[in-house]
């Protein structure tokens, strides 16, 4: 992972917790080519060193936008070939994000439209500011969601609700997103990051191999029938039996102390 990115900020919050901020506030953190390249590099780096972090928080710079989606000013006048080449970067970044073994919590601090909404949907779960708004507006622009939105939204809110959201392109509130199951918690605007960090620390304090294996089991098991998913779960479970962390967890419980997990 790079120490510095042109369009991202990374901050080590200690204890394995990392804050990742989309940093283009002057354009509502819109997704231009460089942001796509930076996200691709970031997720590839995390995937290559899964033990380096225990939990990642994803948010947007400023207090108005998580991400307004694709940078349409940059896209104005693009040839078909240039558009598709840029979108391939976004596709690769979305796949790398989806494959991330480390838990990712979305802290949606404002507008999350188009690709920004799709990024929120790629998170493992989401807390949102009470002023946040969501939308997948692509059909109003002659395109459609293309960074997993047609796949992740139905899994979050159900097929019929997803059809309505995507085919109308209508925005919806954080409270609606909560009621529909897309958002886990709606927070006061000035408390959002504080609450997400508190939850992130709870995750980071747990055994990192256990957390990664549990995430792995949920993600892949949901794509299987129940019997196959249960078999997959046991394979994931058995990975932890010979670990030092499993022994430490049991010993700490019996000694009535906080476990000191080391990810091995």
Image: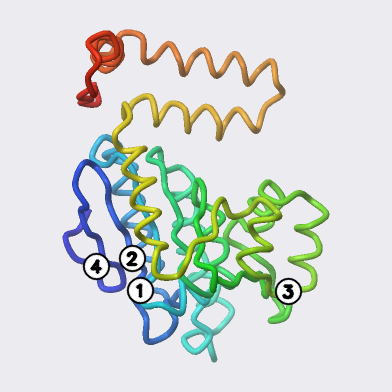
**Which circle marks residue 61 in the picture?**
1
Does residue 7 sit above or below 208 in this rendering? below
Nearest the viewer among 117 and 206 is 206
Answer few, some or many: residues within 10 Å of disc 4's Cα (few below 14, many 20 plus, some between 14 and 19).
Answer: some
| Residue 148 found in image quarter | bottom right
Q: Which structural element holds mark 2?
A: strand
**Mark 1 crowdedness (10 Å alpha carbons): few <14, some 14-19, many ≥20:** many
Place of residue 214 in the rendered image (x, y in percent of width and height, measured from the top left): 47, 27
**Which residue is located at x 31 percent, y 72 percent?**
7
Looking at the rendered image, the disc whose residue lies closer to the viewer, 4 or 3, is: 3
Question: Which residue lies under the disc numbered 2?
Answer: 21
Task: Please tell me which residue is depicted at 30% across the width and 8% down the height of the picture.
Answer: 242
**Answer yes or no: do the residues labelled 1 and 2 have beta carbons within 8 Å?**
yes
Of the image marks 4 and 3, the number of the one nearer the N terminus = 4
Label 2 close to label 3 by CB (< 8 Å): no
Instruction: Indicate the secondary structure of the residue bearing disc 3.
Output: loop
How many angstroms separate mark 2 from mark 3 (CA)? Answer: 26 Å
Where's the C terminus, which quadrant? top left
Q: Residue at x 55, y 84 (%)?
A: 79
Measured in 3D between alpha carbons, the distance from the residue under mark 2 to the one under mark 4, in whole angstroms, is: 11 Å
Viewer-nearest of discs 4 and 1? 1
Q: Is residue 99 left or right of residue 229?
A: left
Q: According to the image, label 3 marks what residue?
A: 169
> In front of the other: label 1 or label 3?
1
**Left/right of residue 41 with respect to residue 109 in the rendered view:** left
Q: Position of residue 259 (x, y in %)?
A: 24, 22
- How many residues crowd mark 3 within 10 Å: few (<14), some (14–19), many (20+)? many
Q: Residue at x 42, y 85 (%)?
A: 27
Specify the farthest residue to the left: 3
In terms of sequence position, does the residue under pointer 1 or pointer 3 come before the other? 1
Q: Would you name the residue on which mark 4 appears?
A: 5
């Amino acid at each position: 992972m790079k120490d510095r990115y042109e369009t991202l900020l990374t901050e080590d919050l200690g204890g394995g917790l990392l804050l990742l901020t989309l940093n283009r506030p002057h354009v509502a953190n819109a997704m231009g080519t460089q942001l796509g390249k930076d996200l691709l590099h970031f997720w590839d780096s995390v995937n290559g060193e899964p033990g380096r972090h225990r939990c990642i928080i994803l948010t947007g710079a400023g207090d108005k936008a998580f991400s307004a989606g694709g940078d349409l000013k940059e896209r104005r006048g693009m040839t078909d070939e240039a558009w598709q080449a840029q979108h391939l970067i976004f596709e690769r970044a979305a796949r790398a994000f989806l494959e991330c073994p480390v838990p990712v919590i979305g802290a949606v601090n404002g507008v999350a439209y188009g690709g920004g909404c799709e990024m929120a949907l790629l998170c493992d779960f989401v807390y949102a500011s009470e002023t946040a708004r969501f939308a997948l507006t692509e059909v109003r622009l002659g395109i459609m969601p293309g960074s997993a939105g047609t796949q992740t939204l139905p899994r979050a809110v159900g097929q019929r609700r997803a059809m309505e959201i995507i085919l109308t392109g209508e925005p919806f509130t954080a409270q609606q997103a909560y009621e529909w199951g897309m958002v886990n918690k709606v927070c006061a605007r000035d408390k959002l990051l504080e609450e997400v960090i508190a939850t992130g620390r709870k995750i980071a304090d747990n055994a990192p191999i256990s957390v990664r294996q549990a995430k792995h089991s949920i993600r892949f098991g949901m794509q299987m029938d129940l019997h196959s998913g249960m078999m997959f779960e046991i394979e994931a479970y058995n990975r932890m039996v010979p670990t030092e962390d499993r022994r430490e967890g049991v010993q700490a419980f019996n000694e009535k102390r906080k476990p000191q997990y080391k990810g091995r």
